Image (cartoon, rainbow, N blue to C red):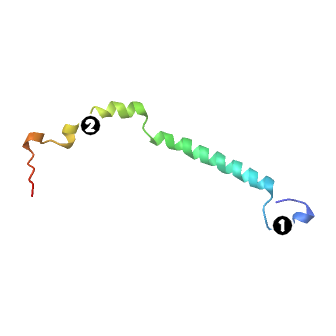
Amino acid sequence: MSSRDRDAGRKYVSGSSKRKRAIKRKQVKENLRESLYKYIKSDDQETSTKHLLTESHFNPVPAENNLYINI
């Protein structure tokens, strides 16, 4: 806190320390955001895997063999 006598019984935080805390929080938030980028795939990696995942992987039966029944 502060070394001044009049600040000894203060129950609220001064404006300067609020600003310091806000700056510190902002820096920590930015550091965390940058650290998450190593876990996120970039666009280059996504496009290289797009050709591997085609509709045939998800629907192995051709469309003409599917039966639709109207009730």
In the image, residue 43 lies at what x, y percent?
41, 33
Q: Is residue 69 left or right of residue 46?
A: left
Q: Is residue 42 left or right of residue 11?
A: left
Q: Is residue 34 left or right of residue 1?
A: left
Q: Is residue 2 left or right of residue 47?
A: right
Farthest residue, direction front: 71
The image quadrant where one finds the C terminus is bottom left
Residue at 15 percent across and 41 percent down: it is 60
Disc 1 target residue: 10
Question: What's under tag 2, amino acid-wise?
Answer: Leu
Question: What's under tag 1, amino acid-wise?
Answer: Arg
Residue at 8 percent across and 40 percent down: it is 64
Q: Quadrant of residue 61?
A: top left
Residue 43 circle label: none
In the image, residue 57 lies at what x, y percent?
20, 40
- Asked whether the residues under the numbered discs 1 and 2 touch, taking CB atoms below 8 Å apart as contact, a structural biologist would say no
Q: Quadrant of residue 52?
A: top left
In the image, residue 53 lies at what x, y percent?
26, 37
Residue at 45 percent across and 42 percent down: it is 39
Sequence-first tag of 1 and 2: 1
**Tag 1 secondary structure:** loop
Give the Cα separation between the discs numbered 1 and 2: 63 Å
Disc 2 target residue: 53
Q: Quadrant of residue 63?
A: top left
**Tag 2 secondary structure:** loop
Packing grade of label 2 (10 A; few <14, some 14-19, many >=20) is few
The image quadrant where one finds the N terminus is bottom right
Farthest residue, direction right: 5
The count of marks equals: 2
Packing grade of label 1 (10 A; few <14, some 14-19, many >=20) is few
